[in-house]
Image: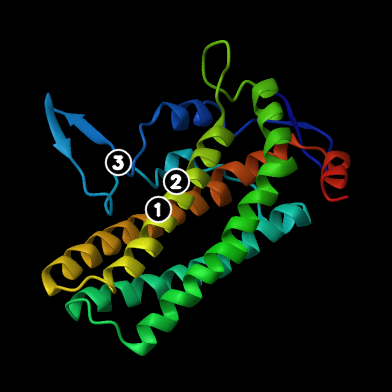
Amino acid sequence: MKIIDRKTGKRIVDPSKKKINKLLKELDPIQRNALKGGELEEHSPMDPPEAYDSSLVVEGVKYEDMHPLLQGFMDEHKVSIKKLEQFEKTLIEFKKSNFTITREANEIFSTFFQFFDDNIMEHNQREEKRFFPLLHQKLIESGEKGEGENPQTAVDMMEDDHIKFIQLGSLTFNILGLATRLPDDHSRALAFDVAYNNGMELIELLRLHIYREDNILFPLAHQLISTEEFVELTK
């Protein structure tokens, strides 16, 4: 694949060669089991094997060199990370307290799910509307795709994540609400524990998703999408 340096106009070596294929061949690191030494080894969703594989990172693309559209997405990621950290901290304290709902915890949970609906979902929809379709096309044209008649690209993985966000977010929110209405302590504790696990899985999936977009997908977009095409995207 030929990639042109925007500043010099010269062809540069594609630092991401074969990385998307490798990424696509991975099983979902949040849920998968890894086969090692002939034995099936189970992994916790909170400790996915090779999830943050540094060999997949596209190097040589700096934030300040990217188009403002990509910078905007990354800036929104930074805000999301802070919200995730606060939500995670509160979830952990919630479990340590034997699932005692305090006014502060309730406010933080409410704030997070409001942010999830108003910001994270809206962010994902903007990606899916025009940016992802163009990048998917560019990845296929460049050879950064899977095999078969309908080859997948990294965009398909990101869109699958978006669906999982909705599922996990809805489960966590609804089970938290349901648990508060259960009459006996045992059932309530069981429901809160399920909500806790779903919430922690959502946090880890969001972090992994942001890592992959910031370090793989967006640098590839910077290389493959022209300045003129970015202008069209932002109209």
Kindly indicate whether the residue at mark 1 contacts the one at mark 2 (C-beta within 8 angstroms): yes
**Which one is in front in this view, the residue at disc 2 or the one at disc 3?**
2
- Mark 1 — residue? 168
Which residue is drawn at the image coordinates 49% and 25% (left, top)? 21
Q: What residue type is labelled 2?
A: Lys
Quarter placement of the N terminus = top right
**Which one is in front in this view, the residue at disc 3 or the one at disc 1?**
1
Kindly indicate whether the residue at mark 1 contacts the one at mark 3 (C-beta within 8 angstroms): no
Give the CA separation, mark 2 to mark 1. Answer: 6 Å
Q: What crowding class fits label 1: few (fewer than 14 Cα within 10 Å), some (14-19), or many (20 or more)?
A: many
Give the CA separation, mark 2 to mark 3. Answer: 12 Å
Secondary structure at badge 1 equals helix
Q: Nearer the viewer, residue 8 or 129?
A: 129
174 relative position to 185: left or right: right
Q: Earlier in the sequence, mark 2 or mark 3?
A: 3
Q: What crowding class fits label 3: few (fewer than 14 Cα within 10 Å), some (14-19), or many (20 or more)?
A: some
- Mark 2 — residue? 164
Which residue is drawn at the image coordinates 46% and 29% (left, top)? 24
Residue 29 % position (x, y): 34, 41
Secondary structure at badge 3 equals loop
